[in-house]
Image (cartoon, grey):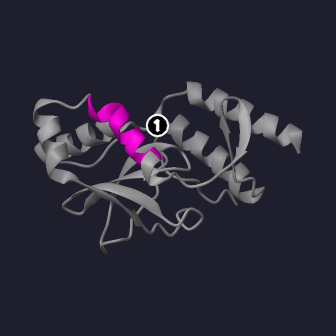
Amino acid sequence: MMLLFILYFILQEILRENLSKKGQRLRCKVAKVFKIILNLKVIKKNNKMEQWGPISLSELFDEIQKTEKDLDGELKNFWDLIKIDPIKWEEKEYGEMGGGFWVVAICGYKVIWFNDIEEGFNISNYKIFGEIDGYWCNQDEIAWSVARLFELVKFGGGVIGQASGPHNMI
């Protein structure tokens, strides 16, 4: 079992160095394959293995405040318009284990939410209030997601730079 942990973290580090979109997807796939198939449900923090658990509301506020201060001008105004008090929303693919994911902003039919499995913010669509459509495993800071969503509103098009979840390899 220890060999599997070592292999998992070696692969994660190798793939983390490849910052391309394809590299991000592959890294997410490797992580999910190890976590789901082996049912490890562990994370690595400060070089220690710990049991995974969903992020608490106070930890989420800490994550938001870490980079919220980087927003200014138009981005700060935009953030002030779209942010909400965090609320857990369902995500059918990977959200059940932690009781859903925290949504922190809503703009039209898009939400910014925190993926506490991958420890980063993501942008997804929704059709039904309370249900996230589409799992992403970006490890973005809130400021990056706000800027990407602002650019989408300002210039149109689609959200770019999203790392998708794992796909069936069979």
Instruction: Say if residue 81 shows up in the picture.
Output: yes
Residue farthest to the bottom?
128
At x 16%, y 37%, the residue is 76
Picture quarter with the C terminus: bottom right
Image quadrant where residue 151 sits: top left
Label 1: which residue? 21
Disc 1 on helix, strand or loop?
helix
User: Is residue 29 shown left or right of residue 87?
Assistant: right
At x 45%, y 42%, the residue is 120
On the image, the x and y values in percent for residue 85 come to 29, 57
User: Is residue 79 shown left or right of residue 96?
Assistant: left
Q: Is residue 65 magenta?
A: yes
Q: Main secondary structure of the magenta part?
A: helix
Taking 42 as reference, is 144 above or below it?
Answer: above
Residue farthest to the front?
58
Q: Is residue 25 magenta?
A: no
Which sits in the foreground, 133 or 76? 76
Quick one: label 1, few (<14), some, or many (20+) residues within 10 Å? some
At x 48%, y 31%, the residue is 20
The amino acid marked with disc number 1 is Lys
Taking 44 as reference, is 135 above or below it?
Answer: below
Picture quarter with the N terminus: top right
On the image, the x and y values in percent for residue 28 come to 58, 45
On the image, the x and y values in percent for residue 128 come to 31, 75
Taking 1 as reference, is 11 above or below it?
Answer: above
At x 65%, y 51%, the residue is 52
Q: Which residues are magenta?
A: 59-69
On the image, the x and y values in percent for residue 126 come to 32, 66
Which sits in the foreground, 169 or 1? 1
